[in-house]
């Protein structure tokens, strides 16, 4: 079974070929135009997807040595995400599926991040706990099977990646700043500044806006922390406070829900401190641990095709007529094409 998958929910345009659950090719282009604005500009993102979409699909087909007539399914991100960006990829996929006469699978972006933990390593033992952390979402989910998810915690304000990006903006580190902060923090002292550790209230919810504000006040009151040499200490201290809050919750959630594995996915799952900390918790608890390869952490079409493959093998052929910019993971039912 060959699937052409398309991802265009935000500022990455990506196409992939998935064959029987294996990635045959993946082409991902991150739009650079947003850097100068310090955040994604929706209109520019949509226009850039228009330029990239067909080029990336053509490259993904070529790299896999697959022709359009060899495809059995098309999968495209239907939501959540930016409306204009989603429309470009999903409409392209709709047109192609109609032309080729093959089904379109309208895929949920966060569900695709969730299953990306299995792309390389195969099935994880159930139930497992997955931490979904990206620029737009932070969630703790218990997975008992395909389409059997319980969200036990989510962020009450900023997503974790958003907090990284906002701290990066305060320091002029460019956008997005997560990877740069991760790199620089490795050279710093995480005990240099005792930033507050949020949400130690027994819930599994997160909050990162207080931490971001604490960093802003620190820089306002003691600007020397922005200087070369001191900046790494500030960033390491920020990261340590963010990680402490997350790792305490993951550890407690894993014990409370008796899970057999811990996993993390989404852009921030690329973070070295997070990967290390989660791995240590899994080792302590004697359970399995999985994070996707770096190319499957950030937004990519391989995860879209992989999640679509899971759907198809579960017998769910859901085609949405249009995109769903807001689409909670708790509502995976979707508009199926009208019968004619
Ligand atoms: O999943 P993703 O590519 O896009 C969304 O769906 O949001 O996640 C992007 C986010 C950005 O906020 C970026 O700063 C963050 O992931 N990120 C990181 C790292 N690499 C990317 N955050 C912390 N450490 C990293 N190494
Ligand atoms: Zn994402």
Image (spheres, grey):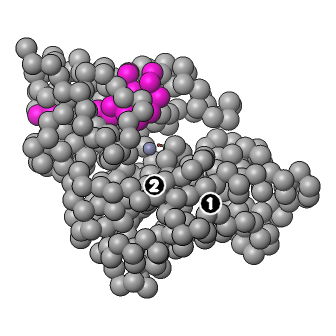
Residue 258: quadrant of the picture: bottom left
**Label 1 within 8 A of ligand 1 by Cβ:** yes
In what element is the residue under mark 2? strand
Q: Residue 185, relative to residue 83: is it above or below?
A: below
Q: Is residue 279 left or right of residue 111?
A: right
What residue is pinned by disc 2? 139
**Pair 2/1: label in front:** 2
Total of numbered circles in the picture? 2
User: What range of the chain is rendered magenta?
Assistant: 72-88
**Front position in the image: 61 or 191:** 191
Name the residue at 45% across, 54% down. 139
Q: Residue 54, relative to residue 231: is it above or below?
A: above
Decide: few, some or many residues near mark 2? Use Cα within 10 Å; few <14, some 14-19, many ≥20. Answer: many
Name the residue at 44% across, 24% down. 83
In x, y percent, where is residue 223?
A: 90, 54
Name the residue at 11% across, 34% down. 72
Q: Is residue 84 magenta?
A: yes
Q: Residue 281, relative to residue 47: is it above or below?
A: below
Q: Residue 69, relative to residue 176: is it above or below?
A: above
What residue is pinned by disc 1? 182
In x, y percent, where is residue 5?
A: 27, 36
Decide: few, some or many residues near mark 1? Use Cα within 10 Å; few <14, some 14-19, many ≥20. Answer: many
* Residue 301 visible to the viewer: no
Residue 282: quadrant of the picture: bottom left
Q: Is residue 93 magenta?
A: no
**Of marks 2 and 1, which one's residue comes earlier in the chain?**
2
**Front position in the image: 320 or 90:** 320
Give the distance between the C-alpha atoms of the residues marked 2 and 1, in whole angstroms.
20 Å
Name the residue at 34% across, 53% down. 114
């Amino acid at each position: 079974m060959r699937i052409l998958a398309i991802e265009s929910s935000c500022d990455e345009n990506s196409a992939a070929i998935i064959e029987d659950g294996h990635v045959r090719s993946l082409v991902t282009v991150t739009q650079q135009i947003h850097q100068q604005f310090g955040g994604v500009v929706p209109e520019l993102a949509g226009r850039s997807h228009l330029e990239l979409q067909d080029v990336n699909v053509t490259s993904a087909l070529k790299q896999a040595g697959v022709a359009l007539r060899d495809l059995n399914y098309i999968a495209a991100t239907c939501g959540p995400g930016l409306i204009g960006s989603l429309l470009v990829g999903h409409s392209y996929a709709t047109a192609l599926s109609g032309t080729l006469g093959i089904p379109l699978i309208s895929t949920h972006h966060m569900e695709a991040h969730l299953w990306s933990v299995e792309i390389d390593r195969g099935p994880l033992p159930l139930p497992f706990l997955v931490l979904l952390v990206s620029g737009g979402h932070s969630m703790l989910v218990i997975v008992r099977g395909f389409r059997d998810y319980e969200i036990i915690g989510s962020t009450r304000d900023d997503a974790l990646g958003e907090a990284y990006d906002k701290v990066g903006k305060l320091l002029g580190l460019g956008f997005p700043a997560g990877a740069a902060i991760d790199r620089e923090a490795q050279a710093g002292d995480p005990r240099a500044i005792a930033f507050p550790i949020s949400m130690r209230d027994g819930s599994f919810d997160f909050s990162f806006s207080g931490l971001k504000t604490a960093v802003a006040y620190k820089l306002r009151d003691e600007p020397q922390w922005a200087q070369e040499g001191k900046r790494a200490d500030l960033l390491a201290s920020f990261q340590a406070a963010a990680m402490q809050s997350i790792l305490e919750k993951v550890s407690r959630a894993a014990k409370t829900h008796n899970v057999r594995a811990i996993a993390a996915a989404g852009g921030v799952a690329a973070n070295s401190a997070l990967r290390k900390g989660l791995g240590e918790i899994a080792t302590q608890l004697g359970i399995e641990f999985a994070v996707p390869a770096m190319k499957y952490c950030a937004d990519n079409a391989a995860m879209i095709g992989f999640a679509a493959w899971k759907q198809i093998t579960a017998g769910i052929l859901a085609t949405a007529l249009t995109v769903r910019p807001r689409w909670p993971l708790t509502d995976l039912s979707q508009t199926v094409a009208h019968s004619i």
